Amino acid sequence: MDFAFTKEQLMFKKEIIRFAKKEIVPRVQEHDLKKQFDFEAFRKLGEFGILGLHFPEEYGGSGADVITTVMAGEALGEAGVDGGLTLAYGAHTFLCADTIFSHGTKEQRKKYIPKLASGEWIGCMGLTEPNAGSDVASMATTAEKKGDTYVLNGSKIFITNGPIADVSVVYAKTDPEQKHTGISAFIVDKDTKGFSSGPNLIKMGVSTSQTSELFFNNCEIPAENLLGKEGEGFNMSLQTVEWDRSALLAPFVGAATYMMTRCVDYAKSREQFGRKIGKFQAIKQKIANIRIFGEAARNLVYRIAWCKDQGRPMNHLEAAVAKLFVGDWSLGPANDAVVLFGGYGYCHEYDMERIFRDSRLAPIGGGTSDIQKMIISKLI
Amino acid sequence: MNYDFNDKEFNLFVEIHALIDEFAKNKNLESPDINTSTKNIRQALALLSQTPYLKLGVEKTNDYNGLLTLMGAMEIVAGTSPSLFLSIETSTRIFGRILSTWGSDSQKEKLLNPLLNGQIIGTVGLSEDSMNVDNDPLMTTAAADGDKVKISGHKQYVINGPLADWIAVAGMMDGKNVICLVEKETPGLTIGEKTSTLGYDGVAISRITLNDCTIDSSQVICPKNNKDMLNTLKLWENQILIGASLGLMKTAFESAKDYSKKHKTGGKPIIAYQEVGFKLSDMLTLFQTSQLFAYRAAWTAEADPKNAESLTLCAKVFCTESAEQVASKAMKILGGSGFLSGNPVEAAFRCAQYGQITGTSTEISRVKIGDTALGAMK
């Protein structure tokens, strides 16, 4: 066992934190308050190379390994980038672009990956439906083969980047009689006739990410937009879980470090009863709780990343453990951070309340904590 | 980065598991009877000395990663018997590391070799009456008297106290922290009766009193980095308690899992009910998270010592509190049978309380973790 990062990885992390603090963080609070997507920040992520970090250079990426890629997510959280932007980045890069890269043809890769890696195009992924959440196999969206086209009908919900995406990876039933094996994946461009997205759903947290429904009304796409083969869609969606349990969880780990840093700064400056509040044991306990959570979560997230780098098939038990821990155990530290700031923690001016709201997605998005418990209890 | 133990380590774990499992058969390793526990510990030490286990973290061992390998192995021994584990570790990893880290060559030759060969039992006397070693200086004193040294003071909660061959007594001499190596029958040393405790029934814990207890000056250890001596001893103690917590969680989780698959209600095993399955999921999540935390803390102790104390405290808080939660959930899954004395889950639940109050208590740990984060503050 060896828990050391390379010097290059650590330097890269510092660079991302420096970049994010300068170029993105100053814009976060305003966009969060207005519940607006920060297109400029997203473009800057693309320019810096973060959106396509793990793709090969020939597709506009940097060829980074999984650990470095996960580290980028942690660095964004550590810098203070909001959960909305990191979620948008995650959905774009890992749920959309990576699915095209991993399962697409050479032509599909060439057409989409460079533009997604640069941030010129924004991607999303449509899996969840109004009546098919964790029970994916019950999805009702269909894709009927007609000549050299597929015709999609149905709708998706809670789609991150839905209202702003240029390209969507959409899962639909090519064989409605089958359960998981009847699901296929398709690429749908935003201007396709019969395709539309709903208005941004107003959410509790991750407010800068834009979330909506997607509608398919006799939406006709070329047959060449099928990803892989018919019936392979469910397995493709499962493969994104590795990223979901590492790169998409990494910003939560970084956010714990950010919370701790902010709490320490505040505790060192705020005075009550004639002394800095950092002198009080109750404050130290809260700071300790935040650090303990961050350190514990970090190990789980990087374990998934390291296994992926080794080319191992995903360990569903370990992945579910990581997701469950970050989801359910992040509430306490986030709450501690808000309470440590007192009234200021409850106000938008200080970003602890935003982080608290953002953190509430962790036990819900990408498979609820209850679903993780179902997976774990079945596997043991 | 590498999240796997290597083949050598894995084989060692298998070997230790087989040895200790076989040893535990038909024995009550949690027996409160002092003669039984003395016999058990001596036999177990002799057995484990056939493997590299006792040397891990004490002496350099080729092919193994010191404390990291040790943490993996600790879980196995602690999972078999928490009491046996605590006695062995106090002897080997605290008394042994005092010798290997600060002892002279002659002290090592005289005591360390027999210790690692499983021939003697050691312990340490650190905690004192009405004092907190985190804040106050030691009250036990050692004073030179020619080529002898006289020690006076009281020590409480001395693990292995009634059965140890040698005791490392922490005290002050000429304003400095020192450790005095005291043999069990030295005049002036009084060993108290075994104390009755909530958990760790098989561990002999007692007070000791030193009243002008006279030893040869060659038996005094003056650690070079004198001011850090108490912190170092606490660090070693915390590492043991982390390992103990892993063992307790392993026992509680495995017992509850097995029970939930065998015990049926409503015509199906209780694991099929979400109320049980979800509890097991939480337990496994805490257990796996604790394992990784423990491994990284152990790795950091050798790879990045200046950050080891704080990270170890983080791991100690997490692992010991998780052990209590896991044992508590296991009790609920086992229902009435978990409440019966002698059930390993019931024992794990009681033992789990100890980890949080000893070493650096979880409360003091959090304060220290906070202090580290806050740094120097006016």
Image (cartoon, coloured by chain):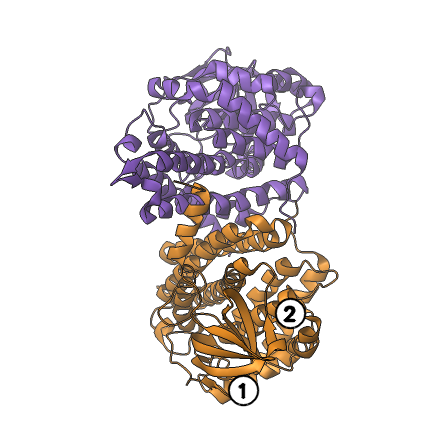
Chain colours: A purple, B orange
Residue B5, placed above or below residue A178? below
Q: Residue placed at 64% from the left, 26% from the top?
A: A101
Q: Can residue A146 be seen in this snapshot?
A: no
Q: Residue placed at 67% from the left, 61% from the top?
A: B10
**Residue under circle 2?**
B103
Locate residue A193, reporting x and y percent: 49, 10
Identity of the residue furthest to the right in this view: B62
Q: Amino acid at mark 1?
A: Thr
Name the element at disc 1. loop
Q: Quadrant of residue A135?
A: top left
Q: Amino acid at mark 2?
A: Gly
Q: Quadrant of residue B184?
A: bottom right
Q: Residue placed at 66% from the left, 19% from the top?
A: A60
User: Label 2 vs label 1: CA separation?
Assistant: 20 Å
Question: Would residue A277 appear left or right of A238 to someone viewing this image?
Answer: left
Subunit bearing disc 1? B
Locate residue A72, reporting x and y percent: 57, 30
Dot 2, crowdedness within 10 Å: few (<14), some or many (≥20)?
many
As drawn, the label of residue B77 is none
Name the element at disc 2. loop
**Residue under circle 1?**
B186
Sequence-wise, which precedes: disc 2 or disc 1? 2
Dot 1, crowdedness within 10 Å: few (<14), some or many (≥20)?
few
Q: Are marks 2 and 1 on the same chain?
A: yes
Q: Quadrant of the N terminus of chain B?
A: top right
Closer to us: A302 or B26: A302
Q: Quadrant of residue B12?
A: bottom right
Locate residue B248, reporting x and y percent: 47, 66
Question: Would residue A123 appear left or right of A270 to someone viewing this image?
Answer: right
